[in-house]
Image: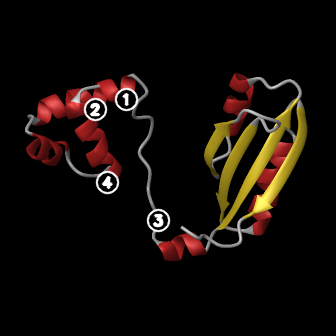
Amino acid sequence: MDKFDQAIINLLTENSRQSVAAIGNIIGLSRTAVNERIRKLEERGIIRRYTVELDNESQEESICAYFELTFHPFESATVTQKLQAIPEIRQAHALSGSTDVLLFVQTRSMERLNQVRQQLSDLDNLGKIVTSTALDRLV
């Protein structure tokens, strides 16, 4: 990655909806060159997705929870595939230590959070699941 790729990533991080032409004007490349660089960043997996950040009011209406999952044995590829089928999972991280996977889940209701927890508890080789509901966002 060179300075142009990094600049593109920084600009897309600030606003993933800005136009390719606007990015090109800021960093001094043509629209075509920026478009090609973005395509290559996507192909290499550096840019994996574009997201929406909701305003604080919308986020306050949602239920947030963290799930710690421990598997016996832990098969990353299988678990990843199953987790991708649950749209409320906002982040999923494989960890070192006694917990294999840490999930951040955001739902519209406690009922849906319970449904997600049930889906998770049905995962193959799951040894332990710990649910921690977020009470307040501090930062």
Q: CA distance from mark 4 to mark 2?
A: 15 Å
Local secondary structure at mark 4: helix
Query: What x and y, as percent, mark residue 113?
Result: 76, 60
Residue tagged by mark 3?
A: 54
Q: CA distance from mark 2 to mark 3?
A: 24 Å
Residue type indicated by callout 1: Glu
Q: Check whether the beta carbons of the residues at disc 3 and disc 4 lie within 8 A of each other.
A: no
Q: Check whether the beta carbons of the residues at disc 1 and disc 2 lie within 8 A of each other.
A: yes
Looking at marks 3 and 4 on the same chain, the residue that comes earlier in the sequence is marked by 4
Residue type indicated by callout 3: Leu
Quarter holding the N terminus is top left
Residue type indicated by callout 4: Glu
Query: What x and y, as percent, mark residue 116?
Result: 77, 52
Looking at marks 4 and 1 on the same chain, the residue that comes earlier in the sequence is marked by 4
Residue tagged by mark 4?
A: 14
Residue 132 in the figure: left or right of residue 5: right
Closest to the camera, between mark 3 and mark 4, is 4
Residue type indicated by callout 2: Ile
Local secondary structure at mark 1: helix
Q: CA distance from mark 4 to mark 1?
A: 17 Å
